[in-house]
Amino acid sequence: MTDIARLNKLFFDNTGMDRKKVESIIGDSLNGADDGELFLEYRQSESFSFDDGKLKAASFDTSQGFGLRAVSGEATGYGHASELSEAAIRRASDTVKAVRSGAHGEMDLSPPATNQQLYTDDNPLQETPFETKVKLLQDIDAYARGRDDRVRQVMASLTGNWQAVQIMRPGGELSGDIRPLVRLSVTVVIGDDDHMESGSSGSGGRYGYDLLLTTDTWRSHVDDAIRQATTLLDADPAPAGEMQVVLGPGWPGILLHEAIGHGLEGDFNRKRTSVFSGLMGERVAAPGVTVIDDGTIGDRRGSLSIDDEGTPTQCTTLIEDGILVAYMQDRMNARLMGTKSTGNGRRQSFAHQPMPRMRNTIMQSGTDNPENILHSVKTGLYAVNFGGGQVDITNGKFVFSASEAYKIEDGKICAPVKGATLIGSGFEVLKKVKAVGHDMQLDPGIGTCGKNGQGVPVGVGQPTLLIDGLTVGGTDALG
């Protein structure tokens, strides 16, 4: 069965809705509007949580519903319900019609369709037995405790989603997507007589559970979590002061995502609340810095065949060799800014309106050798893993905690440190990039981005970077 046939069965055959009648309702709802669509969603999700040697929680949920949107200028009318019926859509239609009075009456053209399929449409929740998923978590717990007798606690979780969406525009044009998503997370707490530390690892993406169930995969996550925790047990207090900072490849791209990526989303720039507003075509980063947002990487957590407005995703260059060349756009902000959607219109569910959101945000590889980058630093910090952080997009200022970091002395990686925070402005940090490694890596597939109360899965990536001067908050004065 093709995707379209499968989606039609889910949203029309199984619900008893008549497609022609729904088309008529949508046509009437959006007549004279500047933009809008009917978003249909069906989702299955499950999660397993294992802690203290026991299965603490297991859940399964099925949800479905629709969201109907009409756009007039900057105004939006939105109605949604968990009931998939013509009557419910008609009631929402009466609500959204109210915004049409200020519309120009020229509906945005639908984007050209593509045949790209970036991931399987198989449902991971139905492919693997319940007992197999629970045994995976039991094996993780047993293996971790057998690896080190100092292990005090093991927490492991497994989550899966299968989401089907269909988007109807005026005239009855349909686009759709079927999106699997899985994730495995492991946290290990290690302690000695009076001191405990934790380490975490995991992976995921738009595929089935098979990869996560392989022994090599889950054992590598346990080993990495134990390594992190053990490293922190012996770590020195982090130095404090302004210094050169080397960011490792891969997951440290979360700093790029938070401190820079949000500031390049179209709505913040249309409203001129981003530090990057009005800087199109100007230098905002050091030469050699190229940043992209790519929704087309196969099987990645942040990838989408189409966005939640029905626009095919693409690879969008945001900063090219240090020059700002594009923002991430959904349809509404693109229309109001006189440009085209970049396929970044995303929403958490049918109950939420779409807005510009990141997908896989990546700083591309440069030409520098990572070893030479480290050798060039006399005194500094090497940060390879990050925890939480805070960002103010109006000025680009951020505070991020480094969950794994090391001192650099005379070009060599030395003692591990704990309690390090990186403090600065994403806008200024881009200009202080002194070297860009040729070793770009993607994160392992664990990221979720929050914005305006909505969470969506995302990816990040970057090569080894040398930042020439960044404030590090710690407890030990820099020598």
Image (spheres, rainbow, N blue to C red):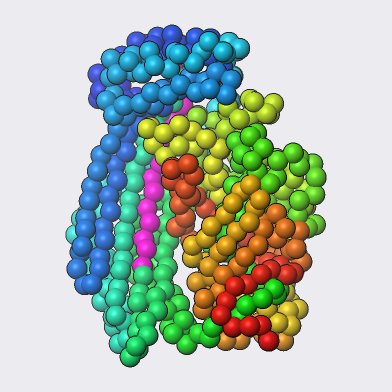
- In the figure, is residue 449 to the left or right of 314? left
Relative depth, front residue between 111 and 187: 187
Residue 149 is a magenta residue: no
Magenta segment:
171-186
Residue 178 is a magenta residue: yes
Asked if residue 440 can be seen in this view, the reply is: no
Q: Give percent across and percent down for residue 231.
A: 47, 83
The residue at the point 36 percent across, 67 percent down is 186
Q: Give percent across and percent down for residue 139.
A: 26, 71
Q: Quadrant of the C terminus?
A: bottom right
Relative depth, front residue between 437 and 30: 30
The residue at the point 53 percent across, 10 percent down is 101
The residue at the point 60 percent across, 67 percent down is 422
The residue at the point 66 percent across, 56 percent down is 426
User: Can you say whether 451 is above or below 259 in the image?
Assistant: above
Relative depth, front residue between 59 and 21: 59
Determine the image quadrant of residue 135.
bottom left
Q: Give percent across and percent down for residue 85.
A: 28, 19
User: Can you say whether 366 is above or below 343 in the image?
Assistant: below
Q: Give percent across and percent down for residue 350.
A: 38, 32
- In the figure, is residue 159 to the left or right of 322? left
Relative depth, front residue between 9 and 191: 191
Q: Quadrant of the N terminus?
A: top left
Q: State the count of labels.
A: 0
Asked if residue 414 can be seen in this view, the reply is: yes
What secondary structure is the magenta-colored segment mainly? strand
